[in-house]
Image: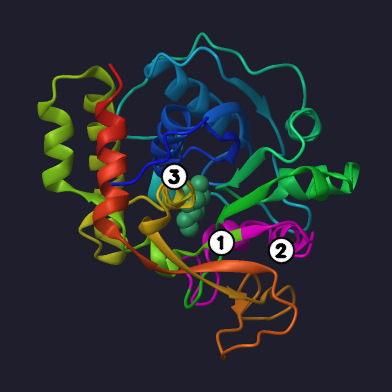
Amino acid sequence: MTISTGERTKLLIDCDPGHDDAVAILVGHRHFDLLAITTTHGNSSLENTTRNALAVLELAGIADVQAAKGAASPLVGATHHAQHVHGKSGLDGHDLPLPSLQPVPDHAIDVIIETARAHQGELILAVIGPATNIALALRKEPRLAGWVKEVTVMGGSGGGGNMTAAAEFNAYCDPEALAAVMTAGWPLRMVGVDVTRTVGIDAANIEILRASGKRTAGVIADLLSFYMSRQTERTGLTHAPMHDACALIPLLDPDAMTYRETRVDVELTGTYTRGMTVCDFRGSPVKNPNARVAVVPNQQRLVGVMMDTVLSYP
Ligand code: RIB
Ligand code: CA
């Protein structure tokens, strides 16, 4: 498995923990120079996602990453959560202690802008929840698009949604924000739920985590057991889909995902299609391409990094 061993890439994760976000945070800290985490509404309320992010950092013994609270609601329209998938707390399955870690006083938008300004041309932005914070940061500081090295989005879909027949959850929660991210002109890769739903940690791997005797792996096993049971009930999946880590691991291991350069537009007005990411796969040349969209995952490589990473924590 080829994981870059060079200087670690600078990363900021904007997230809504969320069970799969939790594993993505562990991957981000283990394999990147994780400069900051910013939280947003999405899988649960902003209060819950922020508490959950801090609890994951504390669980893994990560004390060198700042966390900043962001948007509690989308740019436009109603706020949606995913309690049916992630539970009342947003991270059900194991009663994590209330974290002693606190978020920094700065707003997430300002942390995103300042981090990108301080590391121009070097920072990867991982957007693994609704994109509200990123859109607000772009509105406040338009130069942001030129400061960021690349954006990697878990969101949208190359075909079929999970929140509606057409829209993936993160996109559905704030379509206007995702549209702003997709049209900012920065280098961008997108992994949609059509691909990520097929990549997950199954019962056998959950047992490997539990049998490790390691605290972090044992807690993640409990969390993923809950998350997998909700997924099985609702969609028939027999694994815990690791949507968010799929946005990070291909940055380490290019063989983990195949992408196609295309044009992605976000539907904002459709009665049945609001939040749909319309990906133009008709063939080359694509007019006005704006994203590389994931089309084929290497499940073995992706899940291998996730398992090795979770097991690498005490
Ligand atoms: O549709 C999957 C996405 O929505 C993931 O990011 C998951 O954490 C939720 O935010
Ligand atoms: Ca997420």
The magenta stretch spans residue 175: yes
What SS does tag 3 mark? helix
Q: Nearer the viewer, residue 245 or 219?
A: 245
Residue most toward the top? Answer: 100
Residue most toward the bottom? Answer: 282
For label 1, the crowd category at 10 Å Cα-Cα, with few meaning under 14, some 14 to 19 and many 20 or more, is many
Report the Cα–Cα distance between label 3 and label 2: 23 Å
Q: Is residue 78 above or below residue 56?
A: below
User: Which residue shows up at 64% across the image and 51% down it?
Assistant: 151
Cβ of disc 2 within 8 Å of ligand 1? no
Q: Is residue 178 left or right of residue 185?
A: left
Q: Amino acid under label 3? A: Leu
Q: Is residue 206 above or below residue 47?
A: below
Q: Amino acid under label 1? A: Met
Magenta span of residues: 161-188
Residue identified by numbered label 2 = 182
Q: Is residue 210 above or below residue 15?
A: above
Residue identified by numbered label 1 = 190
Q: Quadrant of residue 252?
A: top left
Residue identified by numbered label 3 = 252
